[in-house]
């Protein structure tokens, strides 16, 4: 007997509770290896399926989309960012794309604040010294001196949900909030934060002590911290990125930290297409850079909520309704019918 349940391919392992719930609601095929699938692997796995449950590690480009079987009508992304998906090609092919926004906001903001504290206060370095030496000479007035956060100027690039949540936390630590964003936030958000809006990015970079990136990756934001803009930053400033590695000219950032022009960076995301830049790793070993492995949203609660959001999107779509977290391309092309 043919199952009437929607058929889905899940490209990575998800929390057990989510996989169990999906198995109850859908005819589910999960990538048990939890390794990133190639395009051919995805095409083989999605044959006869209704839904592709993708993650940010899957490259869903125009070529793959053109070869998807006609049975596939929905790409339900497990994640907030969708820069791994060619939205224009998906739209033109008659596919619906969804994501999992909002549920990552608080955890990502917490992580950004943790990195913002850890880097200038040398928290990781302090731990490493104790572990390496296996002893402690005791307190000294000049030992492990870092930089105070209170009174410093924080420049937020992208004042959306996450940027605003970071600003709220940073304000509680006594930082002065500046921001550059495509749209100015209403007074009800600006005034409690005492924030200053900058319609242009470059002037803001010249006055802030920490630059924190919270903008999605688009054509306009790729390399938004270019070499030229990094040179506009204050000497001794810090860079913080929990968004996407492509927002920064990484080689230029490394150059400026090595030269002492910038004090350092805290990066939860970085270029790893051909392995981590050895120069970046060397800076991390010298405690000028703090690296974490895409951990900003890595809480069990967030992953479960993301999975629940994927399920809601699938069920709503398969019931013939518009899913609540549908993503549209910036420049929609003519559509084709599908399925």
Image (cartoon, helix red, strand yellow):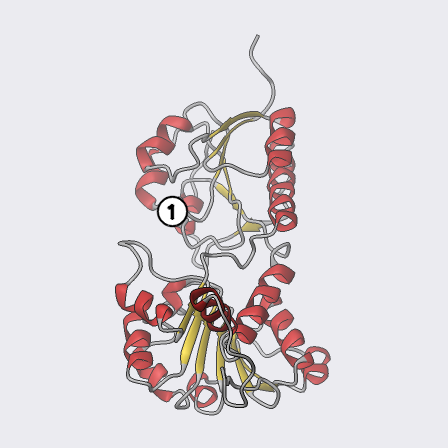
Q: How many marks?
A: 1
Front residue of 123/321: it is: 123
Residue at x-position 40% and y-position 72%:
289
Q: Which residue is mark 1?
A: 89
| SS category of the residue bearing label 1 | helix
Q: Measured from the top left, where is residue 201 in percent x and y?
A: 45, 83
Q: Nearer the viewer, residue 325 or 306?
A: 306
Q: Nearer the viewer, residue 246 or 69?
A: 246
Q: Nearer the viewer, residue 330 or 53?
A: 53
Q: Residue at x 60, y 52 (%)?
A: 299
Q: Position of residue 29 (x, y in %)?
A: 49, 26
Considering only vertical position in the picture, is 138 above or below 59? below
Q: Is residue 63 visible?
A: yes
Residue 291: x and y in percent read 43, 64
The reply to whether residue 219 is visible in this rendering is: no
- Please name the residue shown 72% across and 82% down the image: 192
């Amino acid at each position: 007997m043919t199952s009437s349940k929607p058929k889905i391919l899940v490209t990575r392992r998800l929390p057990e509770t989510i996989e169990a719930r999906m198995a109850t609601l859908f005819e589910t095929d999960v990538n048990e290896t939890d390794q990133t699938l190639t395009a051919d692997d995805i095409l083989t796995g999605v044959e006869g399926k209704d839904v592709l449950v993708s993650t940010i590690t899957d490259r869903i480009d125009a070529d793959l989309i053109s070869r998807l079987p006609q049975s596939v009508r929905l790409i339900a992304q497990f994640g907030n960012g969708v820069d791994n998906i060619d939205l224009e090609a998906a739209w033109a092919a008659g596919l619906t794309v969804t994501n999992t926004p909002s549920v990552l906001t608080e955890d990502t903001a917490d992580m950004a604040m943790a990195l913002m504290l850890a880097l200038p206060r040398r928290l990781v370095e302090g731990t490493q010294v104790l572990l390496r030496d296996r002893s402690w000479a005791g307190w000294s007035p000049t030992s492990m001196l870092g930089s105070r956060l209170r009174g410093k100027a924080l420049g937020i690039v992208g004042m959306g949900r996450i940027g605003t949540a970071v600003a709220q936390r940073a304000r509680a630590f006594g930082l002065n909030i500046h921001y550059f964003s495509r749209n100015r936030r209403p007074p009800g958000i600006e005034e409690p934060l005492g924030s200053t809006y900058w319609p242009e990015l470059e002037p803001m970079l010249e006055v802030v002590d920490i630059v924190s990136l919270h903008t999605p990756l688009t054509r306009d934001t790729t390399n938004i911290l270019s070499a030229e803009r990094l040179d506009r930053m204050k000497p001794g400033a810090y860079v913080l990125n929990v968004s996407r590695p492509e927002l920064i000219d990484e080689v230029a950032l490394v150059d400026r930290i090595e030269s002492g022009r910038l004090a350092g960076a805290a990066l939860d995301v970085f270029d790893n297409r051909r392995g981590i830049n050895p120069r970046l790793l060397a800076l991390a070993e010298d405690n000028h850079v703090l690296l974490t492995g895409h951990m900003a949203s890595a809480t069990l609660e967030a992953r479960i909520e993301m999975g629940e959001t994927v399920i809601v999107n699938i069920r709503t779509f398969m019931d013939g309704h518009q899913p609540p977290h549908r993503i549209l391309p910036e420049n929609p092309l003519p559509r084709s019918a599908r399925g």
